[in-house]
Image: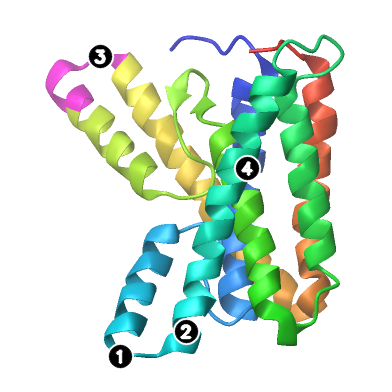
């Protein structure tokens, strides 16, 4: 399997971000009024059901995080355009640092402002999903699993018919990313029981470690 040429594409960083992605989803759903921070498909479904039932307050509850996610993607693309030629640091470092700061702020937002908190989490997710699209040369997501599950199944299916070991390696890598996402969700759930609202600080710390980790290689791609 083709080796990654930059730290933002590395397996270690990808798995760390997958833990963060699972953690964020568990936190927003379990602690912040059952809204998905990462899985906007779920929010769109719930938005549609809320419209059908004319539950307008719930419409806002799901619509605002969806919009915040879009803002996060827009912000990441803007950072890329403006900083892609910087030599001192990788543009993705700035993106992930902003995400870490956003989640740090969320830790101090009370539950009666869940809409605001969930919107910030979704914004951070939008930044992450747009900034980190590959792991070890493969298109992969660290904030949701449907695409990864499809790719894993496809590559393993190819291996069964072709016996090409590279297909098996790729399929197993996708399964590994999914596993770490689930680990992140479990870790988030346990952390909520112990730390409550402040548990999201752990996710912020993980992202800060990712920011530091990226200094080992700051190719501007």
Label 3 and label 1: CA atoms lie apart by: 51 Å
Q: Residue at x 35, y 42 (%)?
A: 147
- Image quarter in which the C terminus is found: top right
Q: Is residue 218 above or below residue 15?
A: above
Residue highlighted by disc 3:
164
Residue highlighted by disc 1:
53
Mark 2 or mark 1, which is nearer the start of the sequence? Answer: 1
Nearer the camera: disc 2 or disc 4: 2
The residue range painted magenta reads 158-165
Q: Secondary structure at mark 1?
A: loop
Confirm whether the magenta stretch covers residue 106. Answer: no
Label 1 and label 2: CA atoms lie apart by: 10 Å
- Image quarter in which the N terminus is found: top left
Report the side of 220 relative to 128 (left or right): right
Asked if the residue under mark 2 is in contact with the one under mark 1, i.e. CB atoms within 8 Å, the reply is yes
Label 1 and label 4: CA atoms lie apart by: 32 Å
Q: Residue at x 59, y 27 (%)?
A: 11
Q: Secondary structure at mark 3?
A: loop
Q: Is residue 102 above or below residue 211?
A: below
* Residue at the limit of the structure toward the left, as seen here: 161
Residue highlighted by disc 2:
58
């Amino acid at each position: 399997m083709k080796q990654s040429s930059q730290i933002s594409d590395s397996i270690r960083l990808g798995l760390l971000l997958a833990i963060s992605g699972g953690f964020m989803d568990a936190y927003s759903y379990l602690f912040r009024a059952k809204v998905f921070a990462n899985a906007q498909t779920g929010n769109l479904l719930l938005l549609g059901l809320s419209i059908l039932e004319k539950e307008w307050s719930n419409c806002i509850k799901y619509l605002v995080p969806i919009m915040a996610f879009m803002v996060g993607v827009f912000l990441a693309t803007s950072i890329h355009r403006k900083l892609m030629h910087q030599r001192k640091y990788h543009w993705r470092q700035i993106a992930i640092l902003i995400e870490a700061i956003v989640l740090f702020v969320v830790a101090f937002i009370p539950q009666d402002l869940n809409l605001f908190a969930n919107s910030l989490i979704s914004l951070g997710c939008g930044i992450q999903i747009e900034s980190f699209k590959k792991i070890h040369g493969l298109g992969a997501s660290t904030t949701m699993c449907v695409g990864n599950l499809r790719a894993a199944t496809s590559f393993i299916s190819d291996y069964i018919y072709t016996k090409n070991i590279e297909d098996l390696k790729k399929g197993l890598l996708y399964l590994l990313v999914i596993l770490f996402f689930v680990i992140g969700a479990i870790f988030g759930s346990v952390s909520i029981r112990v730390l409550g609202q402040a548990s999201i600080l752990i996710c912020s710390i993980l992202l800060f470690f990712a920011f530091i980790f990226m200094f080992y290689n700051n190719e501007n791609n």
